[in-house]
Image (cartoon, rainbow, N blue to C red):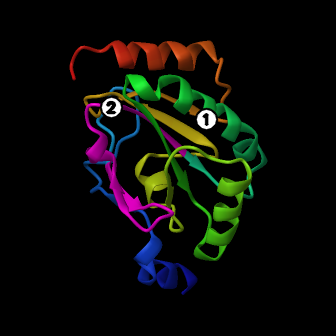
Amino acid sequence: MLRRRHLALGALALVACTSAAERGGAVGEFAPRITGKDLAGEYVALEDHRGEVVLLNLWATWCAPCKFELPALNELHRRYHDRGFLVLGVSVDSERGEAAVRAMVREVPVTYPVLLDPAARAAEALGATGYPTSILVGRDGVVRWRSVGALRDDDPGLVAAIEAALGDAGR
């Protein structure tokens, strides 16, 4: 009953527009089409950022490792943004948790866009098994790298994946 209510109250829900055949998230596959509202109430679509390298980060305010990695995500966004890179946060907090999301984004402060996904549709579409989950999507929409657990901005595997994706000439 509660789940149906969350789905019916989808005004703030992130929508992962996927069929079973379109689900993705594995390295080498196209990322699913994801569209949702950011904290300003504006719709944002992953497809709007085709041609950019996007690090999707699925997180929640109640997740200690998620809180821990926010400064690292800010640093990655700052370091690579001018080269066509974007961190896109996706909060899976419930609709009642929106105030906590807003408070955390102000407190850190988070410098990249955050989408609200109270029904965890993006997490399902991306095959997330825990939080935080991060998925690097190349300029062509193909998943280049993924990780479950808190990120560090100096992680050699992540930095190499970002550099490779940014260097991809297939803009």
> Where residue 117 appears, x then y in whole percent?
50, 63
Residue beneath the point at 29% across and 54% down: 20
Q: Is residue 160 left or right of residue 29?
A: right
Question: Disc 1 on helix, strand or loop?
Answer: helix
Q: Is residue 150 visible?
A: no
* The label number, if any, that marks residue 18 in the structure image: none
Is label 2 in a helix, a strand or a loop?
loop
> Mark 2–mark 1 contact, CB under 8 Å?
no
Specify the quadrant that holds the N terminus: bottom right
Judge whether 40 appears above or below 78 on screen.
Answer: below
Q: Is residue 44 visible?
A: yes
Say which amino acid is labelled 1: Leu
Front residue of this view, candidates 25 and 52 = 52
- In percent of width and height, residue 137 lies at 38, 32
- Above or below residue 17? Residue 150 is above
Q: Residue at x 32, y 31 (%)?
A: 52
What is the three-letter code of the residue carrying label 2? Glu
State the image quarter where residue 143 is shown: top left
**Above/below status of 109 relative to 81:** below
The x and y percentages for residue 27 are 40, 28
Magenta stretch contains residue 14: no
Residue 83, placed above or below residue 91: above
Position of 91 compared to 150: left or right?
left
Who is closer to the viewer here, 31 or 96?
96
Give the residue displayed 45% in from the left and 29% down from the top.
Answer: 81
Q: Quadrant of the C terminus?
A: top left
> Magenta stretch?
33-57
Residue 40 among those drawn in magenta = yes
Q: Earlier in the sequence, mark 2 or mark 1?
A: 2
Residue marked by disc 2: 52
Disc 1 marks which residue?
73
Q: Quadrant of residue 61?
A: bottom right
